Image: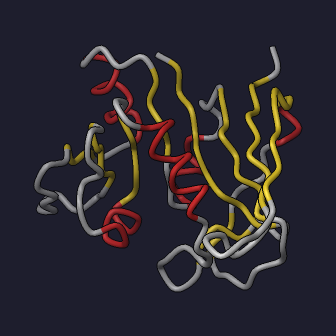
Amino acid sequence: MLISAIVAVSENNVIGRDGHLPWHLSADLKRFKAITTGHAIILGRKNYDDIGRPLPNRTNYVLTRNKDFQAPGCIVCSSLGEAIEAARAAGETECFIIGGAAVYREAMPLVEKLYLTRVLSHVEGDVFFPEWNDKFQKESAESFPADEKNDFPTTFEIWVRKK
């Protein structure tokens, strides 16, 4: 099973502010949906709380240390390893780490492919993506301007772990 991560990151490494995404990028949301639909997604409890529901047409694994946490329509796991093994046992071909910061930090040593949206601006925030790029090489990049549905110009990139 391929372990991938998908994230939108500003030029100053911001991925969140006050428990939410610090931008509206319609193109990025459509890309996220297209890439992750039909696969397993692994996310932390805070990220789940921000989304507020399971994402449809995906197996949602929510990570939390709270043994009493309930997330209807999701599989609640106490560790990243438990979620990855459950996805593997279910026959998943690619699972996606979708955040937040603590989950990305823990998962990046395991990630083989990174779907990155570069938000081409410095953005205020309080949640940051961990350092990663010296272990990966860029496979592709496609740039898009800001417009009425996208707050900032972006570049959609795919990175793969160096062999």
Residue 88: image location, x then y, percent: 34, 19
User: In the rendered picture of this protein, how many numbered marks are placed on residues?
Assistant: 0
Nearest the eye: 45 or 159: 159
Residue 26: image location, x then y, percent: 56, 63
User: Left or right: where does residue 29 sit relative to residue 115?
Assistant: left
Q: Residue 15 sits in which quadrant? A: bottom right
User: Left or right: where does residue 97 sit relative to residue 75?
Assistant: right
Residue 161: image location, x then y, percent: 75, 25
Please tell me which residue is depicted at 35% across the width and 44% down the height of the picture.
Answer: 79
| Image position of 70 with respect to 114: above or below | below
Image quarter hosting the C terminus: top right
User: Left or right: where does residue 74 sit relative to residue 61?
Assistant: left
Please tell me which residue is depicted at 79% across the width and 51% down the height of the picture.
Answer: 155
| Image position of 29 with respect to 60: above or below | below
Please tell me which residue is depicted at 76% across the width and 64% down the height of the picture.
Answer: 119
Residue that extends furthest to the front in the rendered view of this protein = 148
Residue 65: image location, x then y, percent: 29, 58
Please tell me which residue is depicted at 47% across the width and 79% down the height of the picture.
Answer: 19
Looking at the picture, the colour scheme in use is secondary structure
